[in-house]
Amino acid sequence: MRSFFLLFFLIFSIGSIHAENLKPSKGIIATSNPYASKAAYEVIKNGGNAIDASIAVQLVLTLTEPQATGIGGGAFMLYWDAKKSKLFSIDGREKAPSLASEDLFLNKDGKNIKFYPDAVVGAKSVGVPGIIRLLEETHKKFGKLEWSELFTYAIELSENGFSISPALHNTLGYLNYLKTVEPAASLYYKKNIKGEKTPYPVGHILKNEEYAKTLRRISLFGAKEFYEGRTAKLIIQSLKDSDKDALMSLEDLKNYQIVWREPLCELYRSYNVCSMPPPSSGGLTMLMMLKILEDFDIQKLDPESKEMVHLFSEVSRLAYADRAYYMADPDFINIPTQGLLNHQYIDKRRMLINKTKAAKNVSHGNPFDYMDLGKNVDISMPSTSHFVIIDEEGNAVSMTSTVEGPFGSHLMAGGFILNNELTDFSLIPEVNGKKVANRVEGNKRPMSSMTPTIIFKDNEVFALTGSPGGTSIINYVTKSVIGLIDWKLHPSEVVQLPHYMNKGKFTELEKNTVLEDLKLDLESMGHKTKIMRKRSGLHMALKKGDGFVGGADPRREGLVIPIE
């Protein structure tokens, strides 16, 4: 294991962090953090497969990217079993405690409380975590190496320390409330000579002994330890310390189960695009967008042209309008999935697009006289992580995981951050007398935007993609699919494309890109524009000949490693 850490320090000392690999290889690892990518590589070289490597990745990301993801949160995974030629979609989304009710985020006057910090910070926002159960169940079904072996890298890194990255340091710099919440405040900040708390600097070697202890327990006793043992008790204690009336119980943790759902797949051109079904809105919204776009000759449009920005933004508006009304946990709400993807309904939505003018108003459609619902009030934040892995046997994982946040609820237990995913529910349960599909209910999973995706051509893996980014995720991933299929781009080119979208209010143009030059032209077409920083984190793989190439988003700190 000494050589393992020497490899890590070598990465940083020579600055060889790659965002691409141009020569096809047998397999690909692309994660948002170099430590995580190297952990996956070591697992596969020791005889593990894509599932084994995914476990090592997630355990390391919990330590090195705590602002975005961790075992105190949830995830969605797509897994392609090459031997069986079968795709699995696994729902490890967090759940509301059984005692949660639709007025969770309302004050005594029936108004929604302030999103940050009132809703986010503290026990109120924490959902029952799903990641550890997801990792164990997929490992039991598909893994090769011993469960405990997959924890070694993260345990040693926790004990020996990791180098704080610019992303982690910068996030710590603007989270004023995190400085006031223990134990996170003491772990991530130091006091200066004036007694003020400042983030540890980039390059500081940070150790997390409590997390190492948690990992050792779970490595020995499995998910049962997390959901019923000492770790479960630490989670409940952390919540009670924050709020004596915290709703989550030990029974909520004990009863948590993942859901094996049917993957959501639709043809785009001649490619079969597969993603997560609800409770993620990601796959359904993306597929609606692709089906609307399919009748347009996108391959002739410049990805950075006003015509493409206009078209993509108008399609995005239409799909997001439906998303806000019809998508939620399918175990609680009858979602009109087939109605929303029906070609006649898609044709009606497409006819609303004017190629030269932005629509003044866009409202949700009505797929076959569906129930009348209220509009979701959605304010999720862009803190999540995505990775892709293809092993030498052709097994493939596209997984998106999150604690929301940044830094979730700011609470910690056992050395890891607890999520604030309950704020992904609508803060308001009823609008104009109509119930919101995505309202809070006990044991319900909040709607997500996570969009892990695998694309197939002739029943073989063509590409993997996905991204963090809150409600923008769907647009990032949809455009990456277009980049691969319509524009025939290499993943390293796709991840560098500037971002544009419209989720209902503004046509968002990525700051400090060529898109800023399109602002006036788009406004003359009727667009209300907004220049914004966009924090995507696309990690991708693409079939090239007999091998694969990959790409990691330059907006994050990813590392692509080819498996030779």
Image: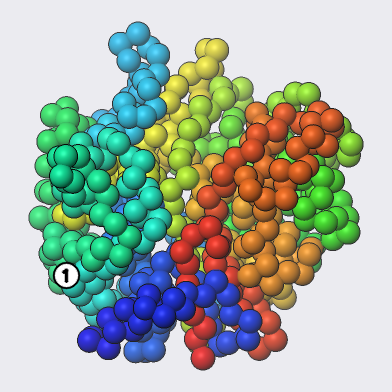
Classify residue 545 by image quadrant: bottom right
Between 403 and 517, the residue placed more toward the observer is 517
Residue located farthest toward the top when viewing the structure as drawn: 109
On screen, 78 above or below 541?
above
Between 66 and 6, the residue placed more toward the observer is 6
Locate residue 362, reporting x and y percent: 73, 27
At horizontal 17% and vertical 30% (from top left) the residue drawn is: 243
**Residue 341 visible, this angle:** no
At horizontal 83% and vertical 56% (from top left) the residue drawn is: 302
At horizontal 78% and vertical 24% (from top left) the residue drawn is: 360
The residue singled out by tag 1 in the image is: 159
On screen, 10 above or below 261?
below
Label 1 crowd (10 A; few <14 / some 14-19 / many >=20): some
Q: Is residue 549 left or right of residue 518?
A: left
Amino acid at pointer 1: Glu
Classify residue 158 by image quadrant: bottom left
On screen, 333 above or below 22?
above
Locate residue 90, reporting x and y percent: 45, 59
Q: Is residue 370 left or right of residue 170?
A: right
Q: Secondary structure at mark 1?
A: helix
